[in-house]
Image (tube, rainbow, N blue to C red):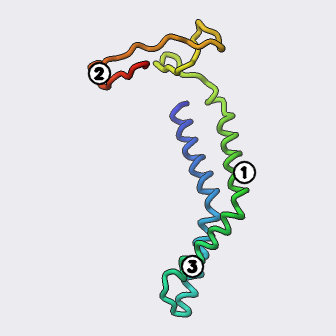
């Protein structure tokens, strides 16, 4: 995954999240404004009178929009995980190692027993755990 791919993923994720929760937030905003207007017209100074309508409206809109929101999330996830950039292996020349990954000497069904050498605390600045 290149840097631009990561940036695109973050931007698309944020836009999807904002687009999904937008109706709920907009309904809460409208309910809050209307509750504030009613409170000022009738000179009600109780804080709970503005809070309860907002919560009730937001819960109702969330309940109604939840199937649509989950469909959006599933579609986004399917589209993201089907991208070819995720199918690529590690870049050539990188020191990447995954437990259970096969090497070119072993087949896809066989696990590789080779591991990268364990570095000491003085070489890498951290303590090597057993089995790494």
- The residue labelled by disc 1 is 71
- The residue labelled by disc 3 is 33
Q: Residues within 10 Å of mark 1 (few under 14, many from 20)?
A: few
Q: Is residue 89 above or below residue 56?
A: above
- Residue sitting at x 54%, y 36%: 4
Is tag 2's residue or tag 3's residue first in the polypeptide sequence?
3
Is tag 1's residue or tag 2's residue first in the polypeptide sequence?
1
Badge 1 element? helix
- The residue labelled by disc 2 is 121
| Residue 42: percent from left, percent from top | 55, 93
Q: How many marks?
A: 3
Q: Residues within 10 Å of mark 3 (few under 14, many from 20)?
A: some
Separation (CA) of disc 1 from disc 2: 49 Å
**Is 66 on the left or on the right of 128, as rendered?**
right
Quadrant including the C terminus = top left
Q: Nearer the viewer, residue 33 or 59?
A: 59
Separation (CA) of disc 3 from disc 1: 30 Å
User: Nearer the viewer's eye, disc 1 or disc 2?
Assistant: 2
User: Nearer the viewer's eye, disc 3 or disc 1?
Assistant: 1
Q: Are marks 3 and 1 in contact (CB under 8 Å)?
A: no
Q: Is residue 113 above or below residue 5?
A: above
Residue 15, numbered label: none
- Residue sitting at x 48%, y 88%: 45
Q: Nearer the viewer, residue 128 or 19?
A: 128
| Residue 38: percent from left, percent from top | 58, 87
- Residue sitting at x 55%, y 30%: 1
Q: Residues within 10 Å of mark 2 (few under 14, many from 20)?
A: few
Separation (CA) of disc 2 from disc 3: 60 Å
**Is 97 on the left or on the right of 67, as rendered?**
left
Q: Is residue 76 above or below residue 4?
A: below
| Residue 81: percent from left, percent from top | 66, 36
Is tag 3's residue or tag 1's residue first in the polypeptide sequence?
3
């Amino acid at each position: 995954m290149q840097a631009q791919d990561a940036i695109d993923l973050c931007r698309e994720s944020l836009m999807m999240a904002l687009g999904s929760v937008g109706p709920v937030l907009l309904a809460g905003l409208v309910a809050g404004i209307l509750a504030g207007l009613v409170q000022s017209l009738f000179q009600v100074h109780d804080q709970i009178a503005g809070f309860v309508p907002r919560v009730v409206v937001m819960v109702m809109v969330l309940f109604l929009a939840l199937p649509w929101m989950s469909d959006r999330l599933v579609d986004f996830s399917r589209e993201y995980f089907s991208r070819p950039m995720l199918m690529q292996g590690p870049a050539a020349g990188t020191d990447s190692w995954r437990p259970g990954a096969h090497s070119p000497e072993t087949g896809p069904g066989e696990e590789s027993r080779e591991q990268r050498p364990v570095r000491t605390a003085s070489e890498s600045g951290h303590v090597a755990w057993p089995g790494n």
